Amino acid sequence: MWCDKVMKILLINPNISESVTALIEAEAKRAALETTQVFTDTVQTGVAYIETPAEAVVAAYAAFDLLAQCHTQYDGVVIAAFGDPGVAQAKEMLPIPVLGLTEAALASAFLLGGRFAIVGISERIGYWYQEMIANLGMTRRFVGYSGLGQAFADVGTVRDEARAVLLQMCLKRVEEGADSIILAGAPLAGLARDIAGDVPVPLIDGVGSAVRMLEAMVRGGFGPRKIGPMSPPPAKAHKNLSPSLAGLIGRGQG
Amino acid sequence: MWCDKVMKILLINPNISESVTALIEAEAKRAALETTQVFTDTVQTGVAYIETPAEAVVAAYAAFDLLAQCHTQYDGVVIAAFGDPGVAQAKEMLPIPVLGLTEAALASAFLLGGRFAIVGISERIGYWYQEMIANLGMTRRFVGYSGLGQAFADVGTVRDEARAVLLQMCLKRVEEGADSIILAGAPLAGLARDIAGDVPVPLIDGVGSAVRMLEAMVRGGFGPRKIGPMSPPPAKAHKNLSPSLAGLIGRGQG
Amino acid sequence: MWCDKVMKILLINPNISESVTALIEAEAKRAALETTQVFTDTVQTGVAYIETPAEAVVAAYAAFDLLAQCHTQYDGVVIAAFGDPGVAQAKEMLPIPVLGLTEAALASAFLLGGRFAIVGISERIGYWYQEMIANLGMTRRFVGYSGLGQAFADVGTVRDEARAVLLQMCLKRVEEGADSIILAGAPLAGLARDIAGDVPVPLIDGVGSAVRMLEAMVRGGFGPRKIGPMSPPPAKAHKNLSPSLAGLIGRGQG
Amino acid sequence: MWCDKVMKILLINPNISESVTALIEAEAKRAALETTQVFTDTVQTGVAYIETPAEAVVAAYAAFDLLAQCHTQYDGVVIAAFGDPGVAQAKEMLPIPVLGLTEAALASAFLLGGRFAIVGISERIGYWYQEMIANLGMTRRFVGYSGLGQAFADVGTVRDEARAVLLQMCLKRVEEGADSIILAGAPLAGLARDIAGDVPVPLIDGVGSAVRMLEAMVRGGFGPRKIGPMSPPPAKAHKNLSPSLAGLIGRGQG
Amino acid sequence: MWCDKVMKILLINPNISESVTALIEAEAKRAALETTQVFTDTVQTGVAYIETPAEAVVAAYAAFDLLAQCHTQYDGVVIAAFGDPGVAQAKEMLPIPVLGLTEAALASAFLLGGRFAIVGISERIGYWYQEMIANLGMTRRFVGYSGLGQAFADVGTVRDEARAVLLQMCLKRVEEGADSIILAGAPLAGLARDIAGDVPVPLIDGVGSAVRMLEAMVRGGFGPRKIGPMSPPPAKAHKNLSPSLAGLIGRGQG
Amino acid sequence: MWCDKVMKILLINPNISESVTALIEAEAKRAALETTQVFTDTVQTGVAYIETPAEAVVAAYAAFDLLAQCHTQYDGVVIAAFGDPGVAQAKEMLPIPVLGLTEAALASAFLLGGRFAIVGISERIGYWYQEMIANLGMTRRFVGYSGLGQAFADVGTVRDEARAVLLQMCLKRVEEGADSIILAGAPLAGLARDIAGDVPVPLIDGVGSAVRMLEAMVRGGFGPRKIGPMSPPPAKAHKNLSPSLAGLIGRGQG
């Protein structure tokens, strides 16, 4: 079990926008326990925000490279983007808890009970999220996804620019039966707190959920898997991988 | 958001066994944050342990009556039995977070990733849990349930009596592909810690998971639902309910 | 096999409204075989009508207590409320056939073929029914639920008050593809017969379906389960249960 | 509603074995109400028993032709073979209730609650039944299918020849968790009654279930669908159909 | 493996409209490899087009009779109607590849990825297709079905008559999220090519897909099943079947 | 439509083993039409073979980089590894058909009908494939996965080394009900042809299926998606991507 010592957690922003990393950091610090030290980092390869599964592959690879280098310094890690790029795979490679924003938000919705909707910044992203929710077994509780149709000036400020529209989308989903609403995407970190008073059901912040759930998992003291499909990949020949990543992918179980 | 003040949580044992309540309390205190005050209570109506859905209805009603009387003194509540008797329904009635052992353990398994198995003390209980897991959308990840076939002397000591058998059941489920194992039933509270070293995948304790997840949910600051099927039942005529329960079932939303 | 002797069946109204019991009795008598003796009873603890899962737990417990006292006098039992409070659990405890209105209506819809919709008196109840239908495996055939949005004066007369609106809801569901329509809730008992001429697909009455299906099951001569999760709960210590209920929950299989 | 008048029902054997028709008739008469007149008929085209979906198409067509000629003389019809050849389609064409053995047996299992298994005479038939159960939404309750591996001398006497093996298959399925067992195939009509005393869970006879459920449906007074995919096929040009079948397929809705 | 020799394929029109057979033939020839010889045939029993499952049974039987007579002359067969009447069953009977328009179009949609919609000529047919898609495991990708509400003069010319309406239905489904659109029904054969330029996602022609997929399957050199539920029906007694059909249904596996 | 001109297709091996690329090339050339020109390429970054989802992310990224550089020279592309690393995402980015071995083999199994099993070289890979099959909607047809438990000397020769064991695994799956068997993994390319005579159901080769299905899709003439979640990612800021990949991820739809 966890001995209430100081916990160090890392939130990686797997897209290249430093302004989004700042939003993530601010919300993570608000959400964390006093005894938790929050660190953030930003990948140096990829796109401004992750809107499609193809972009998520690029983000996952960049996150792997970064995590391979630094994971030994932390007690747990969040890959801080919706769509959870590389999250399931990083769980396999790393001996510490790894969480994604989507799965953490879904766990919160699951524990609140009833149905949930998702409100986010991109319309296109809806089908991807729907697939993910289906793959994670949550379809029956899913009321639907609403995304901003209009273009936004800056992913770092869309949260404030589009606040009124986002609030309307929340209220519409409540009318359709949502018992809670997930505000999706790191760029919306913190919005839940701002508009909670105007929405008659709980709002779920991905970053806040991920921090709290990660703390719970780290404190759970779950050791690494030594066997099976979630244990580290068996050692094998490799080529042109960064030394740190080769150390994760290529290492054996012995 | 939650202001790291002291949090008061209640764990109700919905069966009448005080010895099980003691196990719950010990594990809950080990799992909780230093700033969390842990309280426990035991229902005064029902059976020695809950093994069937019919017994769970009796337990749920008893838990409702108890919760109706005292819930205003707490920040969150756990109904501390597997099978989550009355949990979904209490979420509807109470303005504070309510969690069950099963849903909290499932949330832990969900965030660990991969497949899980459940090991518990009663063979009969397997189909009930299987149904519950299906209703909660987790069937695809479920390797199976193993329960003690033999009778046990005392629900308060079965954890120690049957340790060797329970360990073997865990190891068998690992061979079958379980990436984590839930030790089900409040009578097994604490066993996970004891045998973790002998099992090559994470063991999930229901009481510990519920305490940590409840703390996470309370700190999330999710307000009560004011609308929809998870909001308090509309006021209506009633008869022969305890005054406290009448206050919950009969109260309106205004 | 059943020897065309007189059959005694009991319909329990698990809410406290005697006016609803009267509707149930009238419809049950119209539906029953000439050789069937129909009895009804009303619980003395609970609410005026059952609109939420929390209320259903209260109703289930009250129905258990009543059934524990009198079940030996009957050949079969209907718990006469939609949502089937306590029905699955009473099947486990009692050696005679037990049916709920929802499952009986769904069996009728299943045997008619195609898709069905449900029309009822409460909007809020929709999500609960949807969950139930999913858990019972009927989602693919389910067109949707329509409930009265407006308040009604009296649960005993809502059937007549709201007839025009209920008829419109039926017709709308037919347009959406419903091949049959279940009129849900004991308070609507008998409405199907009244408006059948105005709706171009079969209307399914819960009480009528339950009586006919119960007669079919009693005549099937299915004996009690002696083994497995549907057999009576194993004997165990108990506290503060009514003697009759203790006799059901506490009795063994020997 | 049905006015306890005499009801005429027809059971069609869609395979050519008159000995099976005799078994069907005997069991149907034992199961029926005193006020029900039971008729049987046998198709004149097809195979000795229906073991594959291809054979079921042949059986369905033969049953259509026969039903088209005579259905107006009956209040309800059973197509008395497992696999329900042509049943869903005949529901569409005929203005009276049509039932199949499989769907009626499944409705009985559904109302008994818990899980069911199926025991039948052909191993090959298992996958077909599994598909059917999945399509009907009953997979979650399905423990599995067991069929006779060995050849049998005569489809009309297999019930008696293979009784001991069939009983053992039932008992094995009970051990695996079956709460009831369907004895599948018209050639096993009546076996349930013979071996019920040796099996600790209810045995479900397809013919008996179909007769009782058909009586329940006829007494329900459900009128024909006038609209939608379960209403009669729209009139259209046709060629080389028998006049009666042309009357059903070609007739309009007006 | 297939030795690029000439391949002979047969497309059977299982409805009686020769004008539709002509559309099928034209499109099949456009789709086929140069080395493929395309043959068509039309059943002589049945209806003008297949709009309901009952009509599909009639069509399946007629197609069986025709296939039983001539299948030995071909390397592969398409039953060229949506709804795939008799296709699954013919796979069982015949030693050569058999494909249906629906399954071939679904395979194309599956390999294109994302979600698909279906646009066809009959509204009524929608529920049938929806069921089929569910049974084939494609529900999650299915945006919906749109059918012509209005009557059409002639099934052989509806493709041209209703082109504008059909195009509008396609565009509406694209707006709703369809990533590809299946134009359903042999009477629409060739329309995909005509309107492809006006729709911003791929259009899938059933006949074209079936021809190309059949060629791929024939070239795959998959031999007949010698065992299991997809192998030829075991030999058994039969009556009044055409000699060719009796040869298929009655033949053994030896 | 495709004008029987020469078609150029590329098969990318997304792992670094040139010996596997040689197996892929040999089988692809055997499977292709005479008018198809087959090209192969091997990624220069990654592992010797892909056994886990984490390794698949690495492979996907490497495949993207390679495809971004050269895709304009081809009419269609196969990413030639089971598990389909990057396939769904490459469909989104590229204007030409992209196929994976798994989806192509599943499409073949789907068109053969009945149930399939998968036999491959790694036990660990089983859960990953099971998840994939579930996400693709094929679970109901899936008999199970069998993988080599023992270590193998060389991924390029495992096909020949382990032939006897692989054949036994096939035969065992046939006994369990498989109507066809997919031989999974590029290292097994060609094995299907070698052992087809010893297995009584069709064997499906991934590479062969992918080539034939890709030819079918290219000949279908399906244009690129111009709208929706399968259309190219919207243009956005990026950093440190290779110029070619930036051209795909960063390009707009205009």
Image (cartoon, coloured by chain):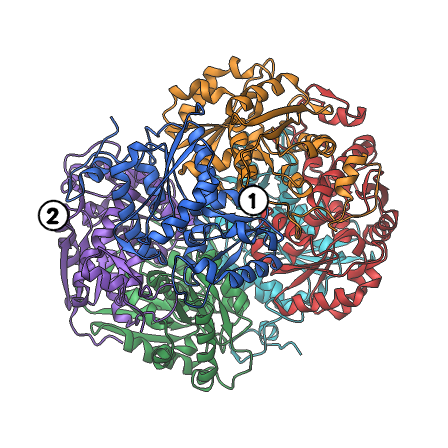
Chain colours: A orange, B blue, C purple, D green, E cyan, F red
Figure check: C14 above or below D218: above
Residues marked 2 and 1 touching at CB (< 8 Å):
no
Q: Can marks 2 and 1 be said to lie on one chain? A: no
Name the element at disc 1: loop
Crowding around mark 1 (Cα neighbors within 10 Å: few <14, some 14 to 19, many 20+) is many
Residue D13 is situated, as x and y percent measured from the top left of the image, at: 41, 74
Figure check: A150 above or below E97: above
Report, in whole angstroms, how far the alpha carbon at label 2 lies from the one at label 1. Answer: 55 Å
Residue, disc 1 = E184
Name the element at disc 2: helix
Which chain is disc 1 placed on?
E
Residue E196 is situated, as x and y percent measured from the top left of the image, at: 64, 33
Crowding around mark 2 (Cα neighbors within 10 Å: few <14, some 14 to 19, many 20+) is some
Residue, disc 2 = C18
Q: What's under tag 2, amino acid-wise?
A: Glu
Which sits in the foreground, A25 or C38? A25
Q: What's under tag 1, amino acid-wise?
A: Ala
- Residue C209 seen anywhere in this rendered image of the structure: yes
Figure check: B227 above or below D86: above
Which chain is disc 2 placed on?
C
Side (left or right) of D75 relative to D107: left
Please report the residue visible at 24 percent of the width from the left and 56 percent of the height from the top.
C239
Which sits in the foreground, C245 or B48? B48
User: Which dot, 2 or 1, sits closer to the camera?
Assistant: 2
- Which quadrant of the view contains residue D1? bottom left
Residue E54 is situated, as x and y percent measured from the top left of the image, at: 45, 57
- From the image, which quarter does the N terminus of chain F lie in? top right
Residue A25 is situated, as x and y percent measured from the top left of the image, at: 59, 21
- From the image, which quarter does the C terminus of chain F lie in? top right
- Which quadrant of the view contains residue F3? top right
